[in-house]
Image (cartoon, helix red, strand yellow):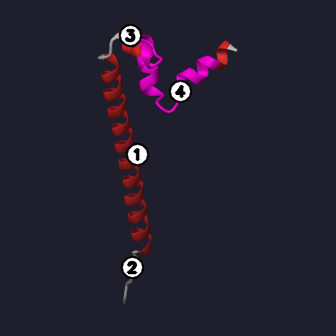
Amino acid sequence: MSTTYSTTWLDRTTSASIRCASTLIWKYWDAFQERRERQKLRSALSELTDMELKDIGTTRGEIDYVASNRGIDPRSIRSGLLL
C-alpha cells in the first residue's frame, strides 16, 4: 500500500501567513516612525518662544494639532472661517 500526501495547501498557507505577518510588521514600523516624527516636531515647536511661534502662524496651544496633522495647513482652515 502506498500513501502519498500533498503539501500544496501547506505551502499556500505558509506563504500567506508570512505575507500577512510581513505586512503587519511593516504597518507597525510605519506607525512607529510616524510617532517618532510627531514627537520630534512637537519637541522642536515646544522649544520655540511665543514670538517665534507667532511668526510661523501658530500658538503654543496648537502645537499638538500641528504635530499630529502635518499635512494640513491650519492657516487655510482659519482663513476659510474668517470669511
> Which residue in the structure is indicated by mark 4?
73
Q: Nearer the viewer, residue 64 or 30?
A: 64
Question: x%, y% of residue 4?
Answer: 38, 83
Residue 52 location, quadrant: top left
Is 42 within the magenta?
no
| Neighbours of disc 4 within 10 Å: few (<14), some (14-19), many (20+) | few
Residue at 37%, 54% (x, y): give it: 22
For the residues bearing labels 1 and 3, Cβ distance under 8 angstroms: no
Circle 4 or circle 1, nearest the eye: 4
Q: Mark 4 or mark 1: which comes first in sequence?
A: 1
| Neighbours of disc 1 within 10 Å: few (<14), some (14-19), many (20+) | few
Circle 2 or circle 3, nearest the eye: 3
Question: x%, y% of residue 35?
Answer: 36, 32
Q: Which residues are magenta?
A: 54-79
Question: x%, y% of residue 45?
Answer: 35, 20
- Numbered badge on residue 51: 3
Residue at mark 2 to residue at mark 3: CA–CA distance: 75 Å
Residue at mark 4 to residue at mark 1: CA–CA distance: 26 Å
Which SS class for mark 2?
loop
Circle 4 or circle 3, nearest the eye: 3
Q: Mark 2 or mark 3: which comes first in sequence?
A: 2
> Which residue in the structure is indicated by mark 2?
5
